[in-house]
Image (cartoon, grey):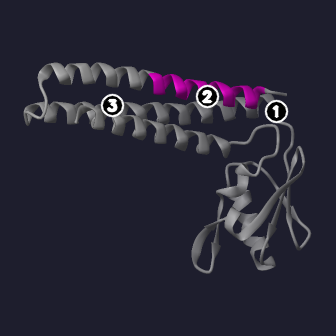
Amino acid sequence: MVNDILNDAENRMKSAIKVLEEDLEGIRTGRATPALVERLTVEYYGAPTPFSQVSTISIPDARTIMVRPFESSLIKAMEKVIQTSELGLTPSNDGKAIRLTLPPLTEERRRDLMKLVNNRLEEARVAVRNVRRDIMKDLKDGEKEKLFSEDERKKAEERLQKVTDQWIVKVDEVGKAKEKEIMEV
């Protein structure tokens, strides 16, 4: 019973890290990557649809992203979405595809991006701590319902704290890797 609860905690914390990593992929660094635009959504037949489902996204060179919509009628809408996103890019199109050229990041823009990254890292830490809080409550409830003893609960809480600390360290590692990527000139 206790092991099931702790396994659930680990899985939930792991998914919080996965969400963080996916979120950070969308933050632009000095080089082009399809992840910057894949998750942007455009209105397609009345439903918000990710770019990755209505276009081909390619990287012709290190600083350019090419988005080729399957239907040319989507180009204007996709351009508008890109302009209103937090990417800070200006799209240009040739009637068949949208080209995004990533300018080199300025020092000020790098600092702004790091603030954004730090906010996302803190949200991930909070998510991990919230999982810990929920599991602690489950452990106390289990003890009250006589599913396990007080000693088992205390041991489980210690193991839970160790797992939590490991995932917080993982959040920090992900953050350091992203910081290195952003600060790379």
Residue located beneath label 3 in the image: 132
Q: Report helix, strand or loop for mark 3.
A: helix
What range of the chain is rendered magenta?
166-183
- Find residue 12 and report its horizontal and vertical position in percent: 40, 40
Q: Residues within 10 Å of mark 3 (few under 14, many from 20)?
A: many
Quadrant for the C terminus, please. top right
Main SS, magenta region, reads: helix
Q: Foreground: 143 or 69?
A: 143
Quarter residue 71 falls in: bottom right
Q: Foreground: 30 or 164?
A: 164
Amino acid carrying mark 3 in the image: Arg
Question: What residue appears at the point 37 percent right and 30 percent down from the top-left corner?
Answer: 129
Of badges 2 and 1, nearer the viewer stands 2
Amino acid carrying mark 1 in the image: Thr
Residue located beneath label 2 in the image: 175
Q: Foreground: 36 or 92?
A: 36
Cα separation between marks 3 and 1: 39 Å
Q: Report helix, strand or loop for mark 2.
A: helix
Question: What residue appears at the point 62 percent right and 80 percent down from the top-left corner?
Answer: 45
Residue located beneath label 1 in the image: 106
Considering only order in the chain, which callout, 1 or 2, is on the residue closer to the N terminus? 1
Q: Residues within 10 Å of mark 1 (few under 14, many from 20)?
A: few
